[in-house]
Image (spheres, rainbow, N blue to C red):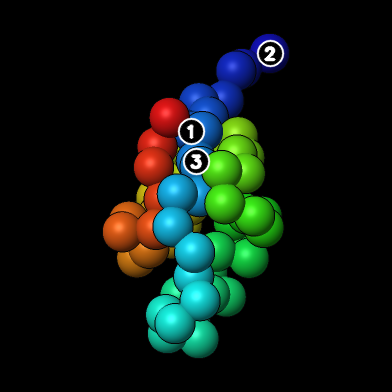
Amino acid sequence: MTTQQTVKVQLIRSPIGCKESHRATVRGLGLRKIRSTRELVDTPEVRGMINKISYLVKVV
């Protein structure tokens, strides 16, 4: 059994006033409210989403 690397992401800024695609990326990561946290599998796709909205999230 292999264990998958995970990355913990927390929303630290509101996506209100941001581009629509950035808001969609926040929702795609499963983040809803400020300070909400999700633990996601560390894949290149997830890393790309985090990089796109790096000014809104923090990797915990």
Q: Nearer the viewer, residue 27 or 45?
A: 27
Between label 3 and label 1, give the one nearer the viewer: 3
Q: Residue at x 44, y 82 (%)?
A: 17
Task: Name above or below for residue 31 compared with residue 21.
Answer: above
| Disc 2: CA contacts within 10 A as few (<14), some (14-19) or many (>=20) | few
Say the numbered circle drawn on residue 9.
3
Question: Percent position (x, y) of residue 7?
Answer: 48, 33
Q: Looking at this view, is 50 or 32 the one in front? A: 32
Looking at the picture, tell me which residue is in the foreground, 42 or 36: 36
Question: Secondary structure beneath disc 2?
Answer: loop
Q: In the visual, does 35 lie left or right of 60?
A: right
Checking the image for residue 27, the label placed there is none
Residue at the disc numbered 2: 1
Image coords of residue 24 (percent x, y): 57, 75
Cα distance in 3D space between marks 1 and 2: 19 Å
Distance Cα–Cα, label 3 vs label 2: 25 Å
Q: Is residue 7 above or below residue 21?
A: above
* Residue at the spot of label 1: 7
Q: Secondary structure at mark 3?
A: strand
* Amino acid bearing label 2: Met
Q: Are marks 3 and 1 in contact (CB under 8 Å)?
A: yes
Camera-nearest label, 1 or 2: 1
Q: Locate the C terminus and report the quarter of the image it occupies.
A: top left
For marks 3 and 2, the one nearer the N-term is: 2
| Amino acid at the residue labelled 1 | Val
- The disc, 1 or 2, on the residue closer to the chain's N-terminal end is 2
The answer to whether residue 44 shows anywhere in this view is no
The local secondary structure at tag 1 comes to strand
Neighbours of disc 3 within 10 Å: few (<14), some (14-19), many (20+): many
**Front-most of residues 47 and 58:** 58
Image x and y of residue 29, in percent:
59, 56
